[in-house]
Amino acid sequence: MEKNALDSRVVIIDKDGTPHYLGSVKEIEFHGEYIMDYIKEYFPGDKEFDGLDMGTARDKFGYHLGNVGKVTYFNGESYGVIYLPDDISDAQIESVYNLNLGNQPVMIGFNPEDYGFICYKTIGINNDYTLKDAMDEYMELKQEKGHIR
């Protein structure tokens, strides 16, 4: 069976647009378990992830994964949250647009700042945006970057 975002707890998208589907919404495990396994596999010993553990808040995971160029989607089952890195590739943009989220409401966090806590600019904070609507608004804000859309 082909994996997809709605059936996964977390999706991490590489710079080349390759999605990594982690966990299942049918399992009880926390998002952090899947992300920590991913970090151990792909970034063993990387100082960027020092201090993170299973109980780390999703916005902090999104921030640190963004610092190494990853897009991170968290499936909350009735809504989704996507954290975008500052330097997002065209391939990642296409991959995000192609996530199959149906009509699931989604929020996008971007341009994070670390003030001792992570603060994002957001689109769809009230979970009233579809993925396409949220990404279209994000792309309007990022037109100066010259992305393909």
Image: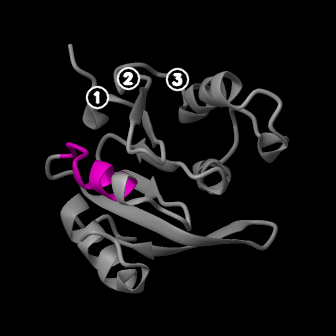
Mark 1 / mark 2, whichever is N-terminal: 1
Image depth: mark 3 or mark 1 in front: 1
Looking at the image, which residue is at 53% across and 34% down? 31
Residue indicated by mark 2: 24
- Closer to the camera, 65 or 28? 65
Q: Quadrant of the C terminus?
A: bottom left
Look at the numbered disc 2 and give the secondary structure of its residue.
loop
Image position of 45 (left or right of 103): right
Looking at the magenta stretch, what is its main secondary structure? Answer: helix
Residue 6 coordinates in the image, percent (x, y): 26, 36
Q: Is residue 148 above or below residue 46?
A: below
Look at the numbered disc 3 and give the secondary structure of its residue.
loop
Mark 3 / mark 2, whichever is N-terminal: 2
Residue indicated by mark 1: 7
| Kind of residue at badge 1 | Asp
Q: Quadrant of the N terminus?
A: top left
- CA separation in Å, label 3 and label 2: 9 Å
Reply yes or no: does residue 117 show up in magenta.
Answer: no
